[in-house]
Amino acid sequence: MSGNNATPAELLSSLRGFSMLIRWMNTAGVAWIFALMFLICADITGRTLFDSPIQAVPEIVAFSLVACVFLQLAYAVQMNRLTYAEVFVDLIARRLPGTGQLLPLLASGLGCIVLSIVSVGAAPDFWRAFMTGEFVGVEGIYTLPISPIKFAVVVGAAVAAIECLRQFVARRELRASLVALALLTALSAITVALSSAGLADRSVGILSIVCVLACIALGVPISISLLCVGYAGIALVKRDFGIATDTLSLAAQGTVAEYVFATVPLFVLMGLFVSVSDIGRDSFRSAQQIFGRVRGGLGVATVAANAVFAAITGISIASAAIFAKIAVPEMVRRGYTARFAVGLTAGSSVLGMLIPPSLLLIIYGVIAEVSIGALFIAAIVPGIILAVAFASGVLVMAFVWPGFVGNIDLDVQQDDAASPVDFFKAIAPVVLLIVLVLGGIYGGVFTPTEAGAAGAFAAMCLALLKRRLNWKGLWDVIQETGQVTVTILFLIVSASTFSRMLTLTGLPADMAAYLSSGGLGLLGFLAVYLLLLIVLGTVLDSTSILLILLPLALPVVTELGGDLIWFGIVTVIGVEIGLLTPPLGLSVYVIKSTLDDENISLGAIFSGSFPFVLITLAVTILLMLFPELSLVFL
């Protein structure tokens, strides 16, 4: 077809090398993240064994994170990995098919606009850094040029914007495309008009919250929603789009340029290596040997294995996927009902985000600017309490509710005990990783970032020694690590922009002052806050809830005299309830997709997990009433 007759979609699709460029950029970002693990481990080795640390490792890692995020951003857009709330989108698509065709176009259009603004805003910074030879460090000791990192932001945001545009024009619904263009144009015009209308700052803050929730409900990726509304809100408050563009550029380049943010990819990498090495299976078998001869013992073994697995991964979804394959078939084979087996597996998987090291605690620590090590220490007792509560609940239900748990034949449960050597082989890798990661943090040997690198390297070595990792498996692990990393860190960049905008409006400070003077008190606020966590958990993922709510909640807690470490524990366990509640219930969907069994419905998993939702809620209320349970070791 000639160029004169080609449609815009065909022209963009025919850009040779564009998809290849996206793949190569993603590969560079993925490999870069993997290399950071070796760099940090080399620094630890040099410092510990030879008293010769590598110069500038924190700075190299911090700036590398920015480049890695934007190198992989276009691929994340292409693969639809940016987090969004699909519940409302599916509902709208079923009831209003025409509107359902329009929503993806709006999402792509907004993404194209805001990512283009990021690229345009960052370009002058790159050019200035390039022309002046800007660097960080100390001359004569070490210097690191800044311009390559800024260039990665400019190019990464531009390529991601082009990918959004390609997705927009690639859809052949002409009428929907025209309507989407009209809506985007109208939204832009309204924003410009409002910037000169002199809206009160507080009104801008309230309007921004409403707009973010509306965008999320319409299926716009949460990071894009926060970025767009944050940008527009700053422009309205400052009445200057230039300031808003500069703020957006600074957030893109500086938000995740901190050494502590490397804990996200490193602990994700460790968790994925642990997942492929069959350590979860070994944990379950070891727990089965200890508890398997008690009525309900396999359920207790599932809780114990989940708790142990949580102590070396920190990812609830990984626990749900692994134990759905391991524990559910074994429990069903031994007489437990399928509903109980899947419900317990989903329920106990939430231990992964509470027992340290926890990815959610890391994210909370970064947002609240509190010690991640202190959060890990604070989570020990609540994690044990929740695990014991689950195990106790299983034992009680096994005796008083056999119709739910199942008719367990204790004779069938009898197995020949494993030899001491086999038991040691099964439990040794688990103990090694727990001692290395948590012992290193609590003992002051590692920072949390260094513990993540050491744990990831050790988990990789274990997977290789157990012959569970080949070249393809290694690539799959680091590829998934890269995509999870860009999803979370770009979401944090977007939330930072939104948070800055809210701070400018003064809304968080007003809320804190109002609630502190309104007689509601800390417990009253926590009751409302917990209810809000649960409600949002029905439609949003855990990370998004933290990033949306914390900018509003943290000033209130501080004003009311609450401890931010304790509040972090309450927040994380409250957020995790959302993993088990419909309609989203992420852990439930993971178990359903992992089992792929037509006889086990989503409804059965949700109903099976409901008793464990109540247990988790009871433990959350207990921790709210008695903060000292979280602060006993601090």
Image (tube, rainbow, N blue to C red):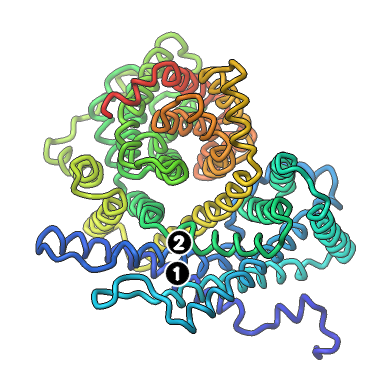
In the rendered image, the quadrant that contains the C terminus is: top left
Q: Amino acid at mark 1?
A: Gly
Q: Position of residue 94 (x, y in %)?
A: 80, 44
Residue 417 position (above or below residue 297): below
Characterize the local packing of mark 1: few (<14), some (14-19) or many (20 or more) Cα atoms within 10 angstroms: many
Q: Residue at x 58, y 30 (%)?
A: 512
Q: Earlier in the sequence, mark 1 or mark 2?
A: 1
Cβ–Cβ under 8 Å for marks 1 and 2: yes
Q: Looking at the picture, how far across and down is residue 92, in whole percent? A: 79, 44
**Residue at x 44%, y 16% (from the top left corner):** 625
Q: Residue 48, labelled with which disc?
A: none
Observer-nearest of 272 and 546: 546
| Residue 139 vs residue 489, the one in the foreground | 139
Relative height, residue 176 to residue 525 (above, below): below
Q: Quadrant of residue 285?
A: top left
- Looking at the image, which residue sits at the far left? 50
Q: Secondary structure at mark 1?
A: helix
> Residue 213 appears in which quarter of the rendering?
top right
Q: Position of residue 332 (x, y in %)?
A: 43, 29
> Left or right: where does residue 498 sit relative to residue 288?
right
Q: Is residue 495 left or right of residue 467?
A: right
Mark 2 residue element: helix
Question: Which amino acid type is shown beneath numbered disc 2?
Answer: Gly
Taking 241 as reference, is 27 left or right? left
The mark found on residue 29 in the picture is: 1
Residue displayed at 33% across by 17% down: 295
Q: Is residue 484 visible?
A: yes
- How far separated are the C-alphas under marks 1 and 2? 7 Å
Residue 341, image quadrant? top left
Residue 482 numbered mark, or none: 2
Q: Quarter holding the N terminus?
A: bottom right
From the viewer's perspective, is residue 222 above or below residue 202? below
